[in-house]
Image: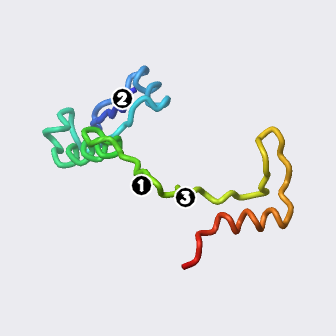
Amino acid sequence: PMPKMLLLAGTDRLDKSLTIGQMQGKFQLVLMPTAGHAIQEDEPQKTSEHLQHFLHRFRIGEPPMVIPRAPQGVRPVLPVVAGPLFEGSRTAAKPLSGSQLAQQQQQQQPPQQ
């Protein structure tokens, strides 16, 4: 679904179907209370600002976002696990002992130079 925005002048009103659509989040509503029916002519600067913000917010017309990857041969940095650690598979969860935990933490630390 494509993002949608409705610029509404202060003199205009939402009908029943638009009110329901706005309440369901089907479009972004921007109310311009000081503009007349011809919003783009009455307030061209504000109209332009609202359109630019909307286009930027949804990355419309921008290149796709690139997620950087680690170079080949570099070990990826993984997030630190919070909470109790378990060894084995997901089906056989057994808590690690203190010495096993210390050994695992030493293995995860990068070598000192």
Toward the bottom, the furthest residue is 113
Tell me which amino acid carries mark 2: Met
| Quadrant for the N terminus in the image | top left
Tag 3's secondary structure? loop
Mark 2–mark 3 distance (CA, rounded to whole Å): 35 Å
Which residue is under mark 3?
77
Quadrant position of residue 52: top left
Q: Is residue 29 left or right of residue 7?
A: right
Q: Is residue 96 above or below residue 59?
A: below
Q: Is residue 68 above or below residue 25?
A: below
Toward the top, the furthest residue is 17
Image coordinates for residue 63, horizontal then vertical, percent: 27, 42
- Within 10 Å of disc 1 (Cα), the crowding (few <14, some 14-19, many 20+) is few
Q: Which label is found at residue 71?
A: 1
Q: Is residue 113 left or right of residue 39?
A: right
Q: Is residue 14 above or below residue 86?
A: above
Q: Indicate which label's residue lies in the foreground, 2 or 3.
A: 3
- Within 10 Å of disc 2 (Cα), the crowding (few <14, some 14-19, many 20+) is few
Say if mark 3 contacts mark 1, CB within 8 Å: no
Tag 1's secondary structure? loop
Which of the pair 81/59 is nearer the observer? 81
| Dot placed on the residue nearer the N-terminal end, 3 or 1 | 1
Which of the pair 77/111 is nearer the observer? 111
| Quadrant for the C terminus in the image | bottom right
Mark 3–mark 1 distance (CA, rounded to whole Å): 12 Å
Image coordinates for residue 46, horizontal then vertical, percent: 22, 48
Say if mark 2 contacts mark 1, CB within 8 Å: no
Q: Indicate which label's residue lies in the foreground, 3 or 1.
A: 1
User: Could you tell me which residue is drawn at 32 percent across and 33 percent down?
Assistant: 6
Which residue is under mark 2?
2
